[in-house]
Image: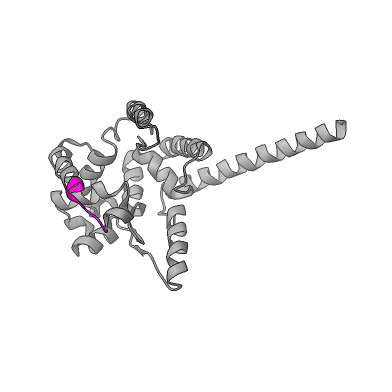
Amino acid sequence: MRGLMRGLKWLLAGLVLLVLAYQLWVFGHLLWWTRFNPSETSFMSLRLAELRERQPDAQLRWQWVPYERISVQLKRAVVASEDDGFVDHEGFDWDAIQRAMEKNRKRGRAAVGGSTISQQLAKNLFLSPSRSYLRKGQEAVITFMMEAVMDKRRILEIYLNVVEWGDGVFGAEAAAQRYYRISAAQLGPEQAARLAVMLPNPRKYEKQFGPRLAAHAASVATRMHYSQVP
């Protein structure tokens, strides 16, 4: 019995050390990315693997562009659509989370998220699209670390460069080229609003941009001028 208990203690200690090592690995990457750009994200790796199941030589559409070469219209549209309190919160919008929980309770399912841009970036960089309490917990830890080492400008710059905008399409530059054949710097208000409302489900909306989504884009276009961006 004592041997069994001793073995369980060593196993638990080993698991704790693995978890701590992973958190240090994540923190190291976040520190590196305060000055250097990511070359890949977890979402990019997953999507590329899916694409190559259908087409072995498939490549992602992705090109990094600096913050100043992304239209301010897109920055405002994304903040208005995804996280209007982005510049003020510290990674978590508790009011939005509470509203999402209430909507999900009424619908009887997890239909609404409430995640901030920082939380979405944490998920895109390191995690997977799957939903679980364990993943949400890790997402929260990464978000906390990210907000501790990065300013809002850098967080938004990385987010706009790595977020998924269609099947194999990542980042603002690739999205602007894919949908409008212009650079991310040239996006106007209406174009930016349409791109912003695609973010919750970009692979679906690139094929089906219906009247309801168009109305949402029009609403974002009227509100985005009031959105604060870094």
Asked whether residue 211 is drawn in magenta, I would say: yes
Tell me if 165 is positioned left or right of 17 in this view.
Answer: left
Residue 56, position in %: x, y? 46, 72
Q: Is residue 168 magenta?
A: no
Left or right relative to 69: residue 189: left
Which quadrant would residue 167 be assigned to in this image? bottom left
Q: Where does the magenta region start and end?
A: 207-214
* Closest to the observer, 35 or 195: 195
**Can residue 10 be seen in the rendering of this structure?**
yes
Whether residue 230 is visible here, answered yes or no, is: no
Q: In the current view of this chain or complex, which residue is farthest to the bottom?
A: 57
Q: Quadrant of residue 1?
A: top right
Vertical position of residue 94 compared to residue 58: above or below: above
Query: In percent of the image, x 19 and y 43: which residue is there?
Result: 216
* Quarter of the C terminus within the rendering: top left
Q: Splitting the image into 4 quarters, where does residue 114 fall?
A: top left
Q: How is the image coloured?
A: one colour
Q: Position of residue 29 (x, y in %)?
A: 49, 48
Residue at x 43% of width, y 73% of height: 57
- Count every numbered label the image shows and give the total: 0
Q: Is residue 194 above or below residue 111?
A: below
User: x and y percent of residue 55 in the render?
Assistant: 43, 72
